[in-house]
Amino acid sequence: MPLSHLRWGTDALSLLISLDPARPPRLLAVGEGAALPDPEREPERCALLAHRALPLVEVQTAGGGRLGTSGKRHVDGAAARGLRYSGHTEREGTDPTGGLVRTLAVTMADERAGLRVTARYTLRPGTPVVASEAVVENTGDTAVTLEYVSSFALANLARRLPDDQRWENGLALWLAANPWSGEFRWARATLAERGLHDVGMVPFGQTGSKNRVAVTSAGSWSSSEYLPTGCLEETETGRALLWQIEHNGSWHAELGDRLGDVYLALAGPADREHQWRERLAPGDSFRTVPAAVALVPGGGCEAALRAMTDHRRSTRRPHPDHQRLPVVFNDFMNSLMGEPSTEALLPLVDAAAEAGAEYFCVDAGWYDAEPPGTVGPGGVPGWWDAVGEWRESPTRFPGGLIEVMDRVRGAGMVPGLWLEPEVVGVRSPLAATLPDEAFFRRDGQRLTEWGRHQLDLRHPAARGHLDAVVDRLVEEYGVGYLKLDYNIDIGAGTDGPDGTDSPGVGLLGHNRAYLDWLDGLLDRHPALVVESCAAGGSRTDHAILSRLPIHSVTDQQDFRLLPAIAAAAPSAVTPEQGAIWAYPLPEHTEAELGTVMVSALLGRVHLSGRPDLLTKSQLSLVRRALDTYKAYRELLPTALPHWPLGFPGWRDGQLALALTLADGRTLLALWRRDGAPESMTVPLPWLPRGHRADVLFEAGPGVALDWDETGRTLRATLPADHSAALIAFEAGVG
C-alpha cells in the first residue's frame, strides 16, 4: 500500500505530512507528537486538514503565476500545485555544538514542467524548534523564472481553537518593530485588531478574505523596521508558534486566512516585494534562505523565545568568546564619537584598564587624515566618506597607531579596531582603483548612498581587498578584535556585472557572499573576536549572529532610554552575544551611574563614555559593577530570559528582565524611570521554594526588598528616580 502520511520528528516536536498521490505533499500539522492527529483513527479530521493545508513549498513562476484570486498573497502558486511526492530521506548528524540533529528531506517533482523541489526540515531532540529550507531544481529543457519560493509554509494554525471561537479573536500576533535606537519594540494584537477577519465567503466557494498580515524587509538592512521574527499565540491557552527568518537581507513573512483557517508563509526575497526574479537555466538550482519555527504548548511568546534561544545557541559557529565574555571598551559612544587620536586615546586606555576592561576597540575615524570637526556630505564628519583603504591617519597618530596598540597591550588589554568593510567612501582612493564590477550598480551606473559605494562581495577584487585588509591589521597591529559596522541601506540590490540579474538576485548573492567571507575570515583567524554592528540593531538576524560571537544591539545615547532596549534584547540576541553600552559620564549621579551599568550587566558589557574624567569614587563604582559581572558571566551562555513585567514598553516607568542560570540562580535587573513609583511588584512564578533575594549591585540610595516566597512575588523599592538594581535569587537557601 502506498504511503499516505508521513509522521516524523522527535520527543519535543513532530511533523505530520500528507503524501496523497493526487496532490502535492502538504504539511498538515506541527506539534508535540502526542498532540498530532492520527490519520488512522481520525481520517475525517486529517482529510479536513489536508483540504486546508498548503504544499510543503509554495512556488510561483513567471510562466505559471497563481491559481485563484489570491490578491497580494503568496499562496496557491500554480507551480506548487503541480508537484507530486517522489521520495524522502531521513538522516542523523551533529550540530556545531556536537548535539544530535535529525534531518528530513521530502522530494516532489513535476516532470512535465521540469521542476524538482526538496523541502528540508531539521530537528534537535529536546528542542521544540524545526529549521526549514527548500531547494528548487530545473530538470527540464527550458529556462524557468522563479518569482517566489517559501522557506516554510504551514496552514491549520487555528486547528486547536474551540469550535465556538473565531480565529480572528482566538489568535494573537506578536511583532517587534525595530527602529534605530529604539530596538525590540514587541506589541501584541489579535488578528482582528491587525485587520484580518473571517469575511464569511468560504461557504460561497471562495478561499477567504484574500487579505494578509504582511511583514517585509527590503534592502540590505535586515531588521531596520521589524525584527525577522514574529509569534502567533492562542489567546486562551498560551500555545505559541514563533518564527525567525535567518537571513541578512530582504525577507517576507505573511499570515492569511484560507478555507476557514490561518496559514503562515516565510521566505527570503520575492518579486513583488523585493525585485527578485531568479532565472534557472536547465540544470540550475536555487536554495531558499533558512527559517526556524518554535512551537510550545503553553507560556506564550515568552516561552517560545526561550526555546528559540536554545536553537540560536545550537546552530551558531563555536567561538571561545562565547565562554570568556570579556568586557570591551569602545571609544565611540558618548566618548570620542569618531574623533580618535593618540592624545585623546591614551588617557582612555589607562582609565578603561583601571575600570576593568579587557579589550579596547578604537572606533571610527582612525584612518581619516582630516582634522577633527571637518564635516562632509550630509553633515557627517570627514571620516564618513573616506572609508575604504583602512590606513592609519598620520595626523591623528604622529607616532603611529601602533603606539596606541602597544599602550593597550601594556595595560593588559587586547587591542581592536572598527571597520565598515562593505562600503567605500566616494573620496576614498579605493573608489577609483577597484573595478566598477566590484560595486553595486544599476543600469551600468555605480550606486551611491550617503557618500558611500557598496562593494559586491561576489567579485574577487572586492573580496581580495577585504581579506588583505584584515590580514594586514592582524599582522601589523596585533588586533584581537574587529568591530564590523554597516551604516547604509543600499536598497533593492544590484543588477550584476553583466546587467542581467534582477536587483534582488544581486543583493541575495552579495548577502550570501558576505556570510561566506565571514566564515573565511574566522577560518583564518579563529581566535579573532569579530563584532556585528549595523547602525545599531539594523542587521539583527541569525544569519550573522550564527557566525559572529558578539553583536552591538543599539546606538542609543540616552541612558534613560537605553533600559527599554537592554531589557528586551534577549528576545533577539542571546545574552552572551548582545552587547549593551555602558557609558559613565562625570555628570551622572550615583543612582544614574547605577542605571548606566545595570543596563549592560545581563548581556555583554560595551564600556564607553569618559572613564578618564570620572572621580575616584565614580570610577570605583564602575569597577565594582564590572567585578560583579565577572563573578557570574561564565553562566550567561546557558541563561534563559524571562520578562516578569511583560515585554518592556518604550515609555514604561518600571522594567524588569530576569535570567535563569544553570546553577539554579536567577538574576533580576530592575529599572525605575521617568518619575515612576518607587515601589514595584514583580511576580517570579517559576522560582521554586528555598530561594533568598539579595541585592547584587546597586548605586545611590539603598534598594529595599520584600520577598514573598509563598506567592513568588518580590516587592522592591528603588528610592531614587532613574535608578536600577541587580538582584540575585540563590537556590537552596532558607
Image: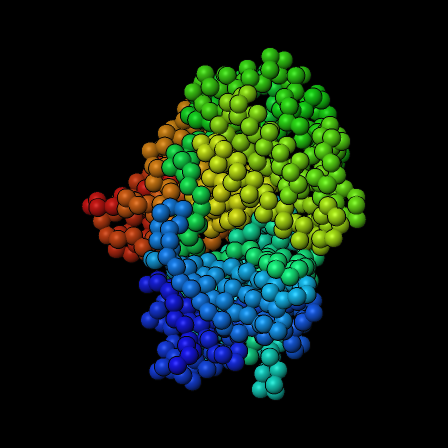
Question: In the image, is residue 316 above or below residue 587?
Answer: below
Residue 276: quadrant of the picture: bottom right
Res. 515 image quadrant: top right
Residue 147 is situated, as x and y percent measured from the top left of the image, at 66, 63
Left or right: where does residue 66 sit relative to residue 663?
right
Whether residue 715 is situated above or below residue 477 in the rendered picture: below
- Residue 500 on image: x %, y %: 74, 53
Q: Quadrant of the N terminus?
A: bottom left
Q: Residue at the location (57% across, 36% down)? A: 484
Residue at (66, 49) in percent of width and height: 507
- Furthest-left residue in view? 734
Query: Which is more toward the observer, 279 or 476?
Result: 279
Answer yes or no: is residue 537 visible: no
Please identify the residue farthest to the top as the structure is shown: 399
> In this orientation, which residue lies closer to the viewer: 19 or 313?
19
Identify which residue is drawn at 79% across, 45% down. 444
Q: In the rendered view, tell whether residue 210 sits above or below residue 576.
A: below
Q: Is residue 492 left or right of residue 11?
A: right
Q: How is the image coloured?
A: rainbow
Give how far across and how far down residue 663 sits, in percent.
Answer: 28, 44
Compare residues 12 and 685 and report the one nearer the observer: 12
Q: Nearer the viewer, residue 125 or 202?
A: 125
The residue furthest bottom is 204
Please state the total of marks drawn on the protein image.
0
Could you say where residue 646 lies in the image, as x and y percent from the top left?
Answer: 44, 55
Q: Is residue 505 visible?
A: yes
Query: Which residue is found at the position 45% from the left and 34% from the top?
Result: 526
